[in-house]
Image (cartoon, coloured by chain):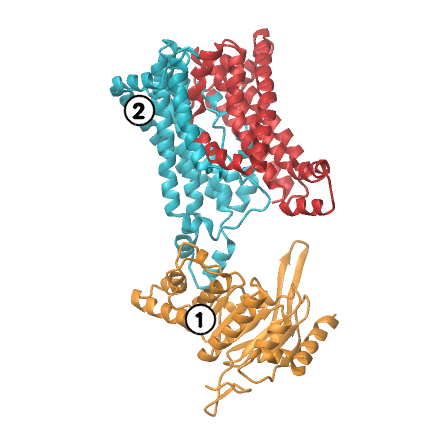
Amino acid sequence: MQHVADMTIFRGQALRPAVEVRGLSHVYAGRDGAVPALADIDLTVPAGKFVVIVGPSGCGKTSLLMMLAGLRAPTSGSILCDGRPIPSPDPSRVGVVFQEASLYPWLTAIDNVEFPLALKHAPRDERRSRAEAMLKLVGLEGFGGRYPHELSGGMKQRVSIARGLVQDPPVLLMDEPFAALDEQTRMTMGQELLRIWSQTSKTVVFITHSLTEAVYLADEVVVMSARPGRILDRVTVDLPRPRTYQMMATDVFGQLRERIWQQIRSAP
Amino acid sequence: MTRPSPRTVRRLIGLGLLVLWEAVPRLGILPALFIPPLTKTLEVLWLDHAIYWAALLVTLSEVAVAMLIACGAGILFGAVVGGVAGIRRLMLPVFSSLYAVPIVILYPVFTAWFGIGSESKIVFAGVYGFFPVMLSTAAGIRTIDEQYLLAARSMGASLPQLLARVIIPASIPTVLAGLRLGGALTIIGVVVSEMLTSADGIGYLVTKNRTTLDSPRVFAAIIVILALSVVFDIFVRAVERRTLVWQTAGRRERPSQAVPAASLPTPAAA
Amino acid sequence: MRGSILILTRIALLAAVLLAWQVLPASGIVNPVLLPPLSEVLRALGDILQRASVHQAIAVTSAEVIVAFLIAVPLGGALGVLSAENEYFGAIFRPMLFYVFSIPKSIFLPLFILAFGIGFPQKVAYATFSTVFIVIMSASAAVESVKAEHLLVAQSYGATRAQILRRVYVPSMMPILLETLRISMIFNFTGVMIAEMYASRAGIGRLIADWGENFEMPQLFAGVILLAVAAIAFNEAVRALEARCSTWRT
């Protein structure tokens, strides 16, 4: 597959969107009554696209991600992944990467990557070869035998990404995965992520606070309002791929960022 | 001249103490009744080694059973009380208040109930070790990162899988700390109770020889007990070092306490 | 669970325990000789509290506890602060301190008896010995808990050593110091009890040991209740104080 602006056409055939959210609302029971977290979300993510969700703190973007992952059920509305609903977590359809790598300290890197396969009782050699392939993909070939406490923050997140991808899900969800890293590591990881994405043609839904990161990574930026979260705008990022750091200094980049920022600022 | 390393200084201090132990009584600085020379003590220990050995076995057997009770019940209750939010809020303050009571005041009750044989020692030492192990485990259980569970759930882990593959491995440092604590405390509990009212065991030898003013034999018994504590401690440290991998990494810090409750020693005043 | 529900539930649990204590022995399910019913114990409690010999024993024990505390805390505090302030000193003694806690300190009781005979000084000395180590460790931890950043800020504003002591160290350390007091008292009280039960002619510890030996169970349990209540009361009082001083702690 080639990465062109419109990914819904492949060999002349329209692909089903990877993720479809319709009329999703979510209300949870707070201490002082019902709290509306999300209101009327409609979102369609075409297959193979890189979509970034930005919004102020508490706007419900993490809740939305949890629902996309099948970890939580919305109070109303529907979510379809590749045309089917997702009632419970299924790493073969949706991989998840959290802000904290959450690698298990008693397992080596490669054991951590294998973990989802071990849960499914996959045969040993199959697990191992798959995990090694993923480690190679994220640039950590040879580091499989290391323990998490021997890895840097960036490396831990790479292992976390490898773990999310190990069952080859078509969709990858990422909840501010680079937020805990320092600026320089973040930039490197962003580039790495784009490389991995281009090599695997997954659909990525990425959450971040950073507008720069959003514009740099995304095909489309979805801007959410404060609670109750609703979609304020969808900003298409037309910049050519592969993205480079130099693009961050261009006018186009700045204008896109400014547009997103204005949306967030002026939202009621 | 650079200062010697702390380790060296400690070793020198230890050596110095041993030398003093030998010299001070021999030189008459302190009466030999109060502190017999080290060599005399060792000599007596060697002469009576069969007696000491038999007593040590009795003590060890009591410690073993008491440890099973203290650690087994302590870890189990600690996991439940610490892990289940409702029970924790209800019972934990109660238990930590009870901890303020010197358990030793219950010893006469136990001797009245179980006699002066091994049973009362075991029950006493078991109870003595139970509370601290329980409190320590309850505290430690809470340091298991919720993120681990979330990550596992996102990978589709079932409840038994969560338990076996995440909760149990993540709890092992806490459990080990509990075992170390419980072991040390049951040794202390057994020794105290043997010293108070008993017919057998190393603690009994301490008391018996004191009443006959046989200082060398008293000290011989003291040496045996010290050796027991030290050996146990070394053993547990060795085990802990093997699992060090888990202990330094991945545990959430509890920022509100400079001295984590789990590492605070308990009334080892015995 | 709401706070009031928690308290009510605990009271209910306590009531259940007390009820069982009364009913089980009174009905004979549990041997009333071994575990006298609560009513009998409470009667004995009333009785012993009126005896002059018991008043004297309480006085002796209290005196031992207080004196030992007054020696151990300043001594241990000074050593603890020293080991925290002086890195070298601390590095030497810290590991030794940890070993000390796994040793049954009661094995040194005969030493104290040989040195002081049986009496007030021996018990105070032993209790002090029991307590001083935990004070050292806690004091040391308290000093270390004062965040380096807070000190740096004060120093950069040119605060004098005395000012830093008063305005940074003391408020910062106060919660831990109170906790130290509380825990040291637990060790102290335990030490006094052990010394009294082991070899003593006076004190509450001696009394309950005697009651136990003579199978005077109601008196024994009464004594245990008395001591337990005293210990818990002190503990909770200091804990309340700690809570007042700790509102700022995360």
Please provide percent x and percent y for residue B43.
Answer: 29, 18
Query: Is residue A53 something that shows in the picture?
Result: yes
Q: Colour of chain C?
A: red
Q: Residue furthest toward the front?
A: B1
Q: At x 54% / y 11%, what residue is drawn?
A: C120
Q: Quadrant of residue A125?
A: bottom left
Q: Which numbered mark, 1 or 2, is in the foreground of this view?
A: 1
Q: Colour of chain B?
A: cyan
- How crowded is the residue under tag 1: few (<14 C-alpha within 10 Å), some, or many (20+)? many
Relative height, residue B97 to residue A101 (above, below): above
Q: Quadrant of residue B29?
A: top left
Q: What's the chain of the residue with tag 1?
A: A
Tell me if C172 is positioned left or right of B169 in this view: right
Q: Which residue is mark 1?
A: A138
Q: Which residue is mark 2?
A: B56
As drawn, the chain in orange is A
Relative height, residue C43 to residue C172 (above, below): above
Please provide percent x and percent y for residue C239.
Answer: 63, 33
Query: Is residue B115 something that shows in the picture?
Result: no
